[in-house]
Image (tube, rainbow, N blue to C red):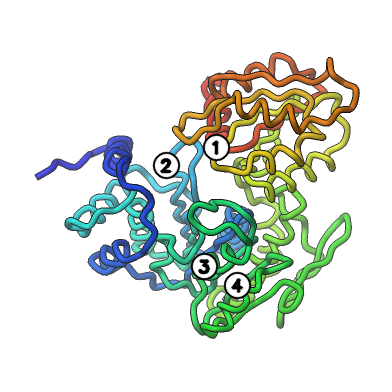
Amino acid sequence: MQTLPTTLPDWLTLLESRHAEAHINMGLDRVRTVKLAMGLTFDCPVIMVAGTNGKGSTCSMLESILLRAGYKVGLYIKPHFLDFNERARIKGSLATDAELIGAFNDVEAARGDVPLTYFEFTTLAIMHLLAGAGLDVAILEVGLGGRLDAVNVIDADVAIVTSVDIDHTDFLGTTREEIGFEKAGIFRPGKAAICSDPVPPASLVAHAEAIGADLWLLGRDFNYSGDKQQWNFGGRSQRRNSLAYPSLRGANQLLNASAALAALEVLRLELPVGAQEIRTGLVTVELPGRFQVLPGRPTVILDVAHNPHAASALALNLGNMGFHPYTYAVFGVMQDKDIAGVVTPMAQYVDHWCIAELPSPRSAHTGDLAATIAGLTPDDGKPGERSITEFADPASAFANAMSRAGENDRIVVFGSFYTVAGVMAARKSSSH
């Protein structure tokens, strides 16, 4: 009999070692088997959120608003930056090590000889933890795709797809139509299926209609409008006027906020929420690493943009920020991403690239990144004012950018979660 770990880091190490060999095996049979063995069910409304970009923002806005309204809210969100506990939030606080260890023990006891990947195991554990926490509502973020994601063994009362773009092509397909079908896999017959993508793939709409889901489309069933000061939401039967802009910055946030408000309209009988709670919830919402502008000088922006859709949004936000003499980029990304598609929208804004290797076997090599960036750098007659420098890790790339940037310049840290997490960790250790 194997003795089980007694600390969270040891548990995570065990799960990683166990699944180093196990490739992502798409299919829900194993997860469903263990879910049934655990008797895992939710006795509160469940909101599930999938999408290429905007999932985390939408989940965080829902959590913030519902907490303001006095509800007991559980949130499963990923990945984490510094501590695994960030993935599980109960009533506004991170799950404790003890709570997570207890949930891991329960999954281990129930799974028998069923092999589970790291993601499947931890997803079951966190959903089990939330299901037993006496919640009024649970918000579950989908990891990859939707149809075959471990979260999808739960039937959501409201399912949201935020955006559909090209990412994870190895698993989800190479077109928006293929990927849209995968994401629509979280929809359920007779339940609300909300899509806040302004141009939803036909495959998503067709699947929702084929299974008899209650499809809410942006522009047909709900919409938003706004001026510089405030914005308005209109749903099927609810209007919300004179709303404050979300504290999460960026051009796409009203799409995400509108999806959140549509979900609250669907659940208005079970979870009534007032206008003031929506305003306050939107103003106070926080989400690390999504166009997060840190206090101080030079200006530092953290953004986990790692696909072309997210990089275009980041570039748009940089363009709206006002004048900075020079922009430094701390950038690292996985080799399976569309690197040229990520670099292209950013190239016009970045003067100095500090590119980093990441602590993952999937990391793109800095030599390859440098060649791609050099080929996409605009030829604007500023040769001496541009540079591309390679570093062994995000922390040293960031330290170099900080040493060179003037106080009126800006540093944008973007790409993989590993890039942003590496800089967050370096900043944390230097502040102690």
Residue 371 at what x, y percent from top left?
67, 27
Mark 3 lies on residue: 47
Q: Residues within 10 Å of mark 1 (few under 14, many from 20)?
A: some
The answer to which quarter of the image holds residue 325 is top right
The answer to which quarter of the image holds residue 269 is bottom right
Query: Do we see residue 295 in this rendering?
Result: no
Q: Which mark is residue 335?
A: 1
Q: CA distance from mark 4 to mark 1?
A: 29 Å
Residue 334 at what x, y percent from top left?
54, 37
- Name the residue type under label 4: Leu
- Name the residue type under label 3: Ile
Q: Which mark is residue 84?
A: 2
Mark 4 lies on residue: 204
Helix, strand or loop at label 1? It is loop
Is there a contact, CB below 8 Å, between mark 3 and mark 1?
no
Q: Is residue 315 left or right of residue 51?
A: right
Disc nearest the viewer among 4 and 2: 4
